[in-house]
Image (spheres, rainbow, N blue to C red):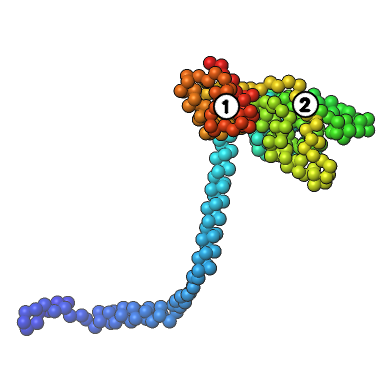
Amino acid sequence: MRKRDRDGHIAFLLSREQWLGVAILVALAVGTVVVLHFFHKPQPAIDVEVTDSTKTAFAAHQARQDSLHKAQWRRQYKRDTIAIVLQPFDPNTADSSTLVHVGLKPWQARNMLKYRAKGGKYRKAEDMRRLYGMTDSLYRVLEPYIRIAVDTVRVDSVRRDSVPRYVSMKRDTVLNLRTADTTELKMIRGIGSYTAREIVRYRAQLGGFVRTEQLLEIQAVRRAIAYRQETDSTYTRDSLLCHFVLDSVVVKTLPVNKLHVEQLQRHPYLRFAQAKALYELRRRRIHIDSAEEVRQLDCFTEEEWKRVVPYLSFER
């Protein structure tokens, strides 16, 4: 209700009922504030003291988590980037790396190694079909590359009570070091799977052995000899070397007039400085004609020169 006062201003006048409504609204508002004040219980503030030890423990935990994530990523990346290289392999002697690279899953390779560790043998290529997870398509791909060593089958077929195993297969065995494979090498007492693989690998790096004493350059062989000497004081390096002969010296040589520094230094007997010196000598003289020219290089001692000469060739 509007009404003008004496000065001419408009004033709003409320009736009794309107004033009553306003009073009720105010009372409700005040009551709501009072109720909230009494029934609301604020949570007490928790005072957490962060000590240096707590910070250190948290940082260590975070570092472990980051390390686990990185390791998991590396394993996944490695699995995803394994190159399949089909090559002949013997399921009775191939290591896990070879098995994975020919197409088997890592867990399949582990199962094969466990089967062999328990005395299991693959006597024919078809036995690979029994491997858990081996599909027909994968077997058809691998079948042309499966090589079962004849010695493995023959030794496995001999009755245990017919031949004293250590006498015939270990103590008196003499192998041709130029051609012996891992299966034959493991016939020698003291040579296990790892040492046999290292011998074959080093032979491939050299291009072939020219002396049986070169076996002593392999760390795994020296460890095998030291291990035997712990239980047998009469055992010497000759006790191992007497099991090997070289029927002929056939090596893969390095054509020094055709190779670059990176290719030369891959040979175990050539350091980077020596490989570079050979390359520079060839550049100055167009080509190297003889081992005597190599002998004149300051980076070669007399012993180093004699050791590497059998592996050098000078064809143009």
Mark count: 2
- The amino acid pointed to by label 1 is Arg
Q: Is residue 246 above or below residue 227?
A: above
Q: Judge left or right: residue 102 versus residue 233.
A: left
Q: Residue under label 2, please give it.
A: 245
Give x and y (percent) for residue 5. 9, 82
Q: Is residue 29 above or below residue 165?
A: below
Describe residue 132's horizontal placement relative to residue 167 as left or right: left
CA gap, disc 1 to disc 2?
29 Å
Q: Secondary structure at mark 2?
A: strand
The earlier-in-sequence mark between 1 and 2 is: 2
**Which residue does the numbered mark 1 point to in the structure image?**
295
Q: Residue at x 84, y 26 (%)?
A: 154
Q: Which mark is residue 37?
A: none
Q: Residue at x 63, y 32 (%)?
A: 303
Q: Residues within 10 Å of mark 2 (few under 14, many from 20)?
A: some
Pick the residue in front: 79 or 98.
98
Residue 98 pos. (x, y %): 66, 32
Looking at this view, name the residue that lies furthest to the left: 7
Which residue is rendered at x = 57% and y = 46% of the image?
Answer: 72
Where is residue 256? Give x, y as percent. Answer: 55, 23
Between 208 and 35, the residue placed more toward the observer is 208
Q: Residue furthest right?
A: 161
